Amino acid sequence: MAEVKLFRTWSSPFALRIVWALKLKDVPYDTIFEDLANKSSLLLQFNPVHKKVPVLVHNGKSVAESFVILEYIEETWKHNPLLPEDPYDRATARFWAKFGEEKVLLSIWEAFNSEGKEQEECIVKAKENLKYLEEELKGKKFFGGERIGFADIALGWLADYEGVFEEVASMKLIAEDEFPLLSEWKRTFADAPIIKENWPPRDKLVIKFQAIREASLLKKLGN
Amino acid sequence: MSGETVKLLGHWASPFALRVIWALKLKEIEYEYVGEDLPNKSPLLLEYNPVHKKIPVLVHGGKPIAESLVILEYLDEAWKHNPILPDDPYERAQARFWARFVDEKCMPSIMSAFTKKGEEKEKAAKEARENFKILESGLGKKQFFGGESVGFVDIAAGWIGLWTRMVEEIADVNIIDTAMMPLLESWFQRVLQVPILKECLPPQDKVLERFKGFHKFLTGGSS
């Protein structure tokens, strides 16, 4: 019987992608919760390069980096594919996953960690990136089409964590009138089977990200 | 599908475009090359890559794909001849992991060493050396990252030794440390001896001049 272990934290949105993928594909697995302030020797052994979560361990061999893990899961367990068959559509999904990580997440995180005029400028940039996602959703229920796919999983943090960022940082990014399709996608994704059962507790996320924001702003003042 | 025309929008000095050229050549895919004059982006480029407005862009049967690593995966999936990724999912995961490591860790630290001055420059160079040392662990005693022949990571990173040498010369830093990374250093040389890769390299003196120009612009001249 194949042995699958997932190293994660309760709050990591990156690890949550792997939870979704494994559950959507009905892959049984064991969870090892890490305390990143006190990393286990197993985590350091299985991810010596980055020392981060998520790490997937399958039959004793480890895979790190969430997108790399997602592709590994997709290729190892063929049930309920996350990527479409057509190479061009696959490239499109990978493109949007990468865009989400390198542009959307980064710009929203910058807005989250700033205030005043600086935050306003970050919000403008973040919204420019979000507009591309809004465009991409035209005529589609999910980024993957009719079903949740690779890009939805990559962008899924937008359906929950992003709302926490907005609340904690007192900013509005994804407004209904400005981003109707993205707003609808957020609701549909957040409420989808498996996805809705696995969101971490919101109140705990708010506390955690409040502390992160305070520390960031303090650090900026010190510079 | 493979009967349709393939076009590559690139730039003669871009290592990211070079990745795609290498893959196209290794897989014996016929293509038309369109060299971009980068300060003056063509309407074609802006149409085919509206999100990033960057090269390389591969256009297959009129449909564009952007982001070099996404393009490499696409080429391997659309043309099965001479695969650049291995068959085994775990080996594929390793290849993807190291290609990302080059882009997300090696490149930024080398760029930092190139653009910064004084103590910050030395700190960046140290990080770049450490990243190369880590990258070496992905190579081990193999001839190439792909094993006996070049693969995904070799294509993604094969140019990096040459480029780093230029950075070292212009910015007066040490990044490639023979004692620290003997296996990687011999790979830097070995990979560029592969005829298909070697013959596609842009004229090195021209690349050096271009880098010198960048360095002057980015640092105000002195190191």
Image: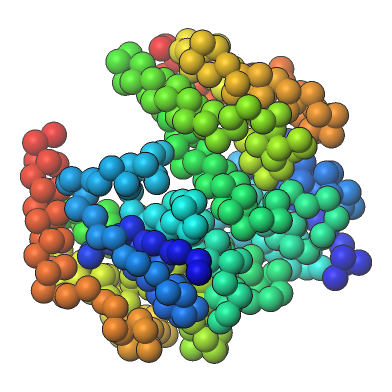
Type of colouring: rainbow
**Residue B95 image point, x, y percent:** 60, 46
For the residue pair A138 and A52, the one nearer the viewer reads as: A52
> Which quadrant of the rendered structure holds the N terminus of chain B?
bottom right
Image quarter of residue B115: top left
Residue B35 appearing in the image? no
Near-viewer residue (A149 or A170): A149
Q: Residue at x 55, y 12 (%)?
A: B178
Residue B50's quadrant in the figure? Answer: bottom right
Pick the residue in front: B57 or A6.
Answer: A6
Quadrant, the C terminus of chain B: top left
In the rendered image of this protein, does residue A69 appear above or below residue B169? below
Residue A28 appears in the rendering: yes
Count the labels in the image.
Answer: 0
Point out residue A203 in the picture as x, y percentages from the top left corner: 11, 74
Q: Position of residue A211 (x, y in %)?
A: 9, 56
Residue in the picture at 8% in, 45% down: A218
Horizontal relation, residue A147 to residue A18: left or right: right
Specify whether B125 is left or right of B88. left
Above or below, A155 against A24 in this view is: above
Residue A163: percent from left, percent from top: 23, 74
Q: Relative to B46, does residue B10 appear above or below in the rendering?
A: above
In the picture, residue A178 is in which quadrant?
bottom left
Q: Residue at x 59, y 23 (%)?
A: B184
Residue B26 higher or lower than A78, as above or below: above
At 50% from the left edge and 69% from the top edge, which residue is drawn? A1
